[in-house]
Image (cartoon, helix red, strand yellow):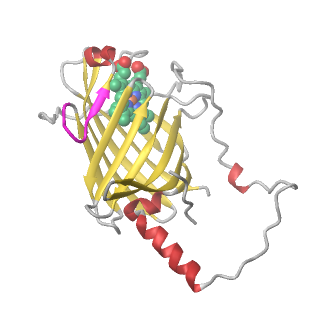
Amino acid sequence: MLGREPGPDGPRPDPIDPIELDESMSSSIWVEDVRPPDLEAAGSPRSARAPVRLPRVQTARDEREEHDVATEWGPLQALAGEWASDTGGLDTAFSHAKGKVLGTPYLEKATLKPFGPVDNGDQHLYGLDYKTAMWRGDEQNPFHTEVGYWLWDAATGEVLRGFVVPRGITVLAGGIATADATEFTMRAAQGELQYAIGENTYLAKRASTLSYEVTIQTDGDTWSYQEDTILKMSDLDEPLHHTDANTLRRVS
Ligand code: HEM
C-alpha cells in the first residue's frame, strides 16, 4: 500500500568489445562506510516488541482509494518498494586504478518511497523518493550511490528522474510515458534547457558527462534498467559509453 508522505549526442564510437571483467573486485572507496545489504533481512522474524495489529475488513472505499493512489503514480507505481539484486549488475567504466576500461559485476539495493502530490500551480506531481547503492561482491562499501526523486505528471505523461551522484554530478532526465507503461526511457544531455547535467569543474575537464539515457522495464516483483552515460574522458580519444544494467527483485 502506498503512503502519502509530504511531501551529444555525437556519433557513437564502436562499443568496446570484449570488455574485461574486474575479477579482483578491489578498488578505491569513496563514500562513507556502509555495510552491504543483508538480502536475507526482509524475511527475519518480527521483534517481540512489535505492536499487535488486528485484522481489518477491506471496504469498497478502501479498494477505491487504493486504486486511486496506485494510478496517481502512473508508470512509477510498479517501482515503489524495497529492491535488491545479486551480483547480476554490470558496469562498464574507465578504471583509473587499472588504466583501462573494465566490466564490473555488482549487487545493488534500492529504496523507492512514494510521496505526493507536489503542486506547482496547476501541475500535480506524484513521485518516489529514492536512494540506491551498488557494491562489488565482497566489499563493505558501495562504489556507486545515487539519491533523488522520480516524478510523474499524469496531465502530460512526463516522467522524470532527478538525482545526484556524489562525484559532484546532478542529472535531471526526462521522457514521455503512458500511465500503464511497463517500459519507458528518460534522457538528459549537457547544455539542454530542460533535461540537463551539472558537474564539478574537475570533471568538466577530465571526465565530462555528455549525455545520460536510461530505459526501465517493470514486471511485477522485478524491474530492470539499462543505462548509457557518455563521458568525454581526457585519457581517451573517443567518447566512452559508461554503461550500467541490472534487474532488481522486490524484498518488501
Ligand atoms: C549503476 C550506475 C553506475 C555505476 C555502478 C558506476 C560506476 C563507476 C565506476 C566503477 C567508475 C570508474 C571509477 C574509477 O575506477 O576511476 C565510474 C566513473 C565515472 N562515472 Fe559512474 N557509475 C554509474 C553511473 C554513473 C552515472 C549515472 C554518471 C553520470 C551521470 C556517472 C558518471 C561517472 C563519471 C563522470 C566517471 C569518471 C570519473 C573519473 O574519471 O574521474 N556514473 N563510475
Q: Would residue 45 appear left or right of 171 to someone viewing this image? A: right
Relative height, residue 194 to residue 165 (above, below)? below
Examine the rendering and report whether any part of residue 34 can be seen: yes
In the image as oriented, which residue stretches furthest toward the front?
A: 121
Q: Main secondary structure of the magenta part?
A: loop
Q: The C terminus appears in which quarter of the rendering?
A: bottom right
Residue 66 location (% of width, % of height): 53, 73
In the image as oriented, which residue stretches furthest toward the bottom?
A: 60
Which residue appears at 69% of the width and 50% of the height? 40
**Image quarter for ligand 1:** top left
Relative height, residue 89 to residue 127 (above, below)? above
| Magenta range | 191-198
Q: Of residues 200 and 84, which is closer to you in this image?
A: 200
Which residue appears at 42% of the width and 66% of the height? 72
Whether residue 24 appears in magenta in the rendering, the answer is: no
Relative height, residue 119 to residue 68 (above, below)? above
Q: Would residue 141 appear left or right of 67 to someone viewing this image? A: right
Residue 31 location (% of width, % of height): 54, 24
Residue 236 location (% of width, % of height): 23, 18
Q: Of residues 27 and 59, which is closer to you in this image?
A: 59
Residue 15 location (% of width, % of height): 23, 35
Q: The N terminus appears in which quarter of the rendering?
A: bottom right
Which residue appears at 38% of the width and 62% of the height? 75
Q: Of residues 37 and 59, which is closer to you in this image?
A: 59
Examine the rendering and report whether any part of residue 102 can be seen: no
Q: Would residue 186 appear left or right of 128 to someone viewing this image? A: left
